[in-house]
Image: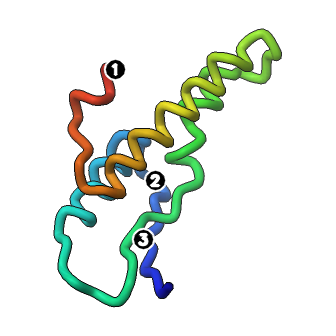
Amino acid sequence: MPSINFLSGGQEPEEATINLNAINQQGGNTPWHLSISYGRALQQTALQAWQGRSENSLAAQQALLKRAKLNHQAMLGSYEASMENN
């Protein structure tokens, strides 16, 4: 499947998720998939929670899972900022 990926570099995690959601709300019947190439925007909150300490591993995993779920909703075009608080 062809894909067009925009880089998320320089964006905060929430901003990148908002932008991914906006891209996917455009919809359209195109032969390609539109997405954002995540790196830091996906990992930043997990790294902040972890802080290199093994005792923070669970918090880091939960932060990564939360961001992944939010990005999944954005991929569907159904992300809402209020989901950040859940």
Mark 2 neighbour density, 10 Å: few (under 14) some (14–19) many (20 or more): few
Identify residue type, mark 3: Phe
Q: State the residue at coordinates (41%, 49%).
A: 72
Where disc 1 sits, the SS reads loop
Check the image and report above or below for 13 versus 5: above
Identify residue type, mark 2: Gly
- Kindly identify which numbered label has been placed on residue 6: 3
Q: CA distance from mark 2 to mark 1?
A: 25 Å
Whichever of callouts 3 and 1 sits on the residue coming sooner in the sequence is: 3
Residue under numbered circle 1: 86
Q: Is residue 55 left or right of residue 86?
A: right
Mark 1 neighbour density, 10 Å: few (under 14) some (14–19) many (20 or more): few
Picture mark count = 3
User: Mark 3 or mark 2, which is nearer to you?
Assistant: 3
Query: Which quarter of the image is occupied by the C terminus?
Result: top left
Percent of width and height locating residue 13: 43, 42
Percent of width and height locating residue 20: 33, 58
Q: Is residue 5 left or right of residue 65?
A: left
Q: State the residue at coordinates (31%, 56%).
A: 76
Residue under numbered circle 2: 10
- The colour scheme used here is rainbow
